[in-house]
Amino acid sequence: MMEHGTVTMRDEIVHLPHERLAEHLADDLAEVNDLIRTRMHSEHAPRIPEVTAHLVEAGGKRLRPMLTIAAARLMGYPGPYHVHLAATVEFIHTATLLHDDVVDGSEKRRGRPTANLLWDNKSSVLVGDYLFARSFQLMTETGNLEVLKILSRAAATIAEGEVLQLTAATDISTDEGVYLQIVRGKTAALFSAACEVGGVIAGADARAVEALAGFGDAMGIAFQIADDLLDFWGDEGIGKNNGDDFRDRKLTLPMIKAIAAADEGERAFWERTIGQGRQSEGDLEEALRLMEAHGTLEATRQDAVSWSDKAKAALEGLPEDPIRDMLTDVADYVVARLN
């Protein structure tokens, strides 16, 4: 039975994989949280920590900074700059969420009202800009030019992915290749960079750094595909309403697969609802029926599992360590949510 982030089995409580990893890295993550709270402070603009705290302390998994800490520790790094890089990754992630909610007009994030709803769009955009600036300050404090290159490239790739999604989201000619490019930009780029900089700051060799980056890339893709599928398969406990992507005319992999398999009449349905945005009562149910009919929900799940398997394979050449085993379990859990 799943309850409050744990799996209850008889009288034993087994924590989820990311929770076990967090427990293993608890001291490092406490330092990351302290640094985040310190660096999100603003002496002259109190709205900055108000808006930032609303999102940063909303109960997120801290998965991306956890990956940085895990990668550095796996490669034998004693510290201290893995903490700076983990905080950097979390600030970049938080900044993108603030901006995304404005672009998408979202009203709920992690089960709570979004910052743009509680304050306004201007505050969300400007605080996001502040966090991006803070992230670059933290990067430079490591004195490592390579990590600056990796994270600044990731920030640019994220923005590029978001713009590509903006232009492709309502175009029913969007194919799986474009979808993968969007996912690699908006999600996998930061997962990959988070792992890669952990290896770089630890002084790992090029092969190990490449493996860490590959793990992050594949897990980020699996994570996003799973999230997109949960929009149709999940429940409202994940902080959004079922079918939001369909209502928002945001093409994701299950819909893209259904459109590719559509006959003339079905394609007209997708053009009306997604391409033109003319939706009416019962359209979501029809979209679900078409996806089920063509087996695209299950096919999407299989794609997520395939990327999870690639993530686990990337870890095989890295040092044997409890952290490596926990990262393997996290990659499994990303797609186990779909079962």
Image (tube, rainbow, N blue to C red):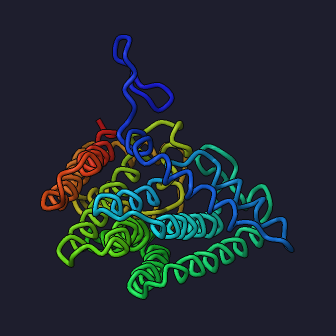
Residue 6 location (% of width, % of height): 43, 28
Residue nearest the viewer, comparing 206 with 259: 206
Q: Residue at (48%, 66%) from the top-left corner?
A: 80
Q: Quadrant of residue 133?
A: bottom right
Q: Quadrant of residue 132?
A: bottom right
Quadrant placement of the N terminus: top left
List the single residue furthest toward the top. 11
Residue 242 higher or lower than 119, as above or below: above
Furthest residue in direction front, as rendered: 78
Task: Give x and y (percent) for residue 29.
Answer: 51, 52
**Observer able to see residue 104:** no
Q: Nearer the viewer, residue 330 or 251?
A: 330
Q: Please name the residue shown 20% across and 49% down the image.
A: 302
* Visible residue check, residue 244: yes
Q: Where 78 sits versus 63, above or below? A: below
On the rendered image, what quadrant is the C terminus found in? top left
Residue found 42% across the figure and 84% down from its top: 153
- Residue at 53 percent of width and 66 percent of height: 93
Give the tally of numbered discs.
Answer: 0
Relative to 44, 100 lies left or right:
left
Q: Is 106 or 65 nearer to us in this picture?
A: 65
- Where residue 211 appears, as percent x and y from the top left, is 21, 68
Most foreground residue, 300 or 150: 150
Q: Horizontal and vertical percent for residue 293?
A: 25, 44
- Residue 337 left/right relative to 130: left
State left or right for residue 310 relative to residue 244.
left
